[in-house]
Amino acid sequence: MNRVLVIGSGGREHALAWRLSQSSTVEKTFVAPGNAGTALEPALENVVLEVSDFSAVIAFCQIQNIQLVVVGPEQPLVDGIVDALTAAGIACFGPTAQAAQLEGSKAFAKDFLNRHQIPTAAYAEFTEVAAANAYLADQQFPIVIKADGLAAGKGVVIAEDMTEAQAAVADMLADNKFGAAGSRIIIEEFLQGEEASYIVIADGENFISMATSQDHKARDDGDSGPNTGGMGAYSPAPVVTPKIDQQVADKVIQATLDGMLKDGMPFTGFLYAGLMIDDQGQAKVLEFNVRFGDPETQPIMLRLKSNLDQLCLAAIDKRLSEVDCQWDERFALGVVMAEAGYPFSYAKNNVINGLDTVASEVKVFHAGTTKKGDQVITSGGRVLCVCALDESLQQAQNKAYKAVKNINWGSEYYRSDIGFKAIKS
Ligand code: AMP
Ligand code: GLY
């Protein structure tokens, strides 16, 4: 029986830990630091750990006899948590710091994609304002400006005209709006089409696709308003047809794993390709994430039937080709409830009401929540992801929104149309 530690504190980590704790081969699941949702989950235990202090994480794993560490967010991966724990003899699921550059540096990812002829938008890379502006003079609009490094999903600007583009360049390169993450930028062709997330579990050579899903990155209904970390997601996503699935599996995912292996940095972990699929059905890579998506994880974990710890351990041991993965055939949909104002400034410490009204077939994953005595209070921009599973996407949507309407804290905000593209088609 395995003892497992999940690193992170968001909705993704709540969902991963919840699923891990239900595995027939897991005895105990810890979450560091976790949130109110993981604290309230009888099968989970939150631990106070400074996760950026890898020696503290190693010491905890040794004392608690942990057999598997699953890392939720990108920052510790980019900082080398897998390298440090592996060196200490602890099985830690995720990419090495070298391989995590696929997310940690957009310039690295674009260069990698081009070198290995994996489809992506045309681009150029800059560190100087003058050179970037000179390049912009010959481009068409809209155009996309991206900070090279990690910027918590905020380092991407879609500029409609020259004024906006030059302002984004100045913000990043001259005014250091994103700190070191923006000291290098990518200017990229704007792609049209429908977005999809394609997430796999990889062992360096082979992979297993997770269920398909689609995220809603824009804050407001109809995919309008500012870009966020994600306001909701559902699975499966019909935009990923069997034909697109095959194309992405071969030309994007396998090509990426082959390329990383060839470049001497085999990729183990969850690999997430953010894709734009054009009206001809051709997929191009918008970005890589070297971890599971948030909120995609939440509906996907509702559908996963296999033991997640066994999948992660098989990947670490390079045995993925020997295992398979079972999914619930039903539809899962998750609605993010956020604090009004997110993704900019927002209130905190509001008491959440109605969590006890939720029907048993609805699952509420917590993100920005904290326990205060017997109350659960808001402590982040994205607060909850209310998920439901049902025979159709429409039924899952109805069920999730019914639960959402009974949860409130005064300044809650959510989109009312999660899943609309798939339900319309
Ligand atoms: P990224 O973090 O690179 O995925 O970018 C965040 C969001 O910006 C994506 O989910 C897309 O909605 C949008 N985006 C990024 N790159 C492009 C592009 N080249 N063309 C159109 N939209 C893009
Ligand atoms: N939902 C998008 C992400 O996890 O980056």
Image: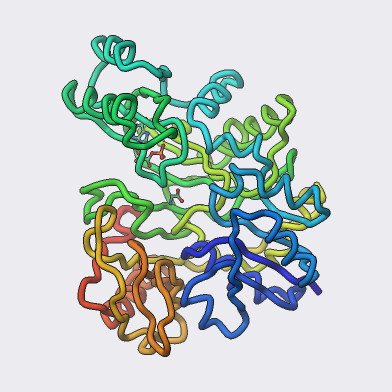
> Which of the 4 quarters of the picture holds residue 113?
top right
**What scheme was used to colour the molecule?**
rainbow
In the rendered view, would you say 256 is above or below 350? above
The spot of residue 169 in percent (x, y) is 29, 25
Residue 353 visible in the current orientation = yes
Q: Nearer the viewer, residue 87 or 302?
A: 87
In the rendered view, would you say 47 is above or below 106? below
> Which of the 4 quarters of the picture holds residue 177?
top left
Residue 303 visible in the current orientation = no
Q: Nearer the viewer, residue 349 or 256?
A: 349
**In this image, 322 relative to 165: left or right?**
right
Q: Nearer the viewer, residue 415 or 325?
A: 415
User: Which residue is at 36% across, 72% downward?
Assistant: 395
User: Which residue is at 42% across, 25% downward?
Assistant: 184
**In this image, 7 relative to 9: left or right?**
right
Picture quarter with the N terminus: bottom right
The spot of residue 140 in percent (x, y) is 24, 18
Q: Nearer the viewer, residue 267 or 174?
A: 174
In the rendered view, would you say 166 is above or below 10? above
The spot of residue 265 in percent (x, y) is 71, 32
Question: How many labels were placed on the picture?
Answer: 0
User: Which residue is at 62% across, 82% downward?
Assistant: 43
> Which of the 4 quarters of the picture holds residue 70?
bottom right
**In this image, 63 relative to 362: left or right?**
right
User: Which residue is at 51% across, 83% downward?
Assistant: 40
The spot of residue 404 in percent (x, y) is 31, 76
